[in-house]
């Protein structure tokens, strides 16, 4: 019994991405669908990779970091990949915390200015 495969269109729909995005991920070698003529088909490996790619993007990782991380699994295995993930996650958590700090400062400043302006109108 062969594993289920998704067509290009089905893959776009399943992950709610544009055809351009899916083609780009293939172009930069994040995905490697099976090709039959002009058609592309995505098996379980590609579905798992797409899940990881989108998760990484949601967490703010650069596509190149995601690509390198996926390559580590293929070349060095799960243990090395998990260690690398911890390092990347630590770095990204620091960056996100800094962004949150800056956002909190901006919100505080904007709120203060809005309150001062509203007060001056009375």
Image (cartoon, rainbow, N blue to C red):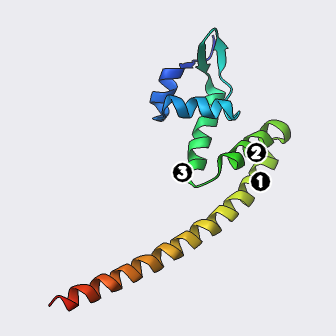
Q: Are the two marked residues, 1 and 2, in contact with CB atoms closer than 8 angstroms?
A: yes
Chain-order first, disc 1 or disc 2: 2
Q: Which mark is residue 58?
A: 3
Image position of 73 (left or right of 34): right
Chain-order first, disc 3 or disc 1: 3
Quadrant where the C terminus is found in the figure: bottom left
Image position of 28 (left or right of 100): right
Residue at the disc numbered 1: 84
Image position of 8 (left or right of 90): left
Tell me residue 54's x, y (percent): 56, 43
User: Which residue is pictured at 64% across the width and 36% down the height?
Assistant: 49
User: Which residue is pictured at 55% across the width and 34% down the height?
Assistant: 21
Tell me residue 61's x, y (percent): 63, 53
Q: Is residue 104 above or below residue 122?
A: above
Q: Is residue 1 above or below residue 27?
A: above
Chain-order first, disc 3 or disc 2: 3
Tell me residue 101's x, y (percent): 53, 76
Classed neighbour count for the residue bearing mark 1: other residues with Cα under 10 Å, few (<14), some (14–19), many (≥20): some
Q: CA distance from mark 3 to mark 1?
A: 18 Å
Q: Are the two marked residues, 3 and 1, in contact with CB atoms closer than 8 angstroms?
A: no
Q: Is residue 104 above or below residue 65?
A: below
User: Which residue is pictured at 61% across the width and 42% down the height?
Assistant: 53
User: Which residue is pictured at 77% across the width and 47% down the height?
Assistant: 81
Q: CA distance from mark 3 to mark 2?
A: 17 Å
**Secondary structure at numbered mark 1:** helix
Res 31 quadrant in image: top right
Classed neighbour count for the residue bearing mark 2: other residues with Cα under 10 Å, few (<14), some (14–19), many (≥20): few
Residue at the disc numbered 2: 68
Tell me residue 13's x, y (percent): 45, 28
């Amino acid at each position: 019994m062969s594993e289920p495969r998704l067509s290009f269109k089905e893959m776009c729909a399943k992950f709610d991405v544009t055809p351009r995005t899916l083609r780009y991920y293939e172009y930069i070698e994040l995905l490697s669908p099976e090709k039959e003529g002009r058609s592309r088909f995505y098996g379980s490996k590609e579905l798992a990779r797409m899940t990881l790619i989108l998760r990484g993007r949601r967490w703010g990782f650069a596509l190149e970091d995601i690509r390198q991380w996926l390559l580590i699994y293929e070349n060095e295995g799960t243990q090395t990949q998990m260690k690398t993930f911890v390092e990347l996650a630590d770095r990204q958590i620091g960056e996100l915390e800094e962004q949150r700090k800056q956002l909190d400062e901006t919100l505080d400043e904007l709120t203060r200015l809005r309150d001062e302006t509203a007060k001056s109108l009375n």
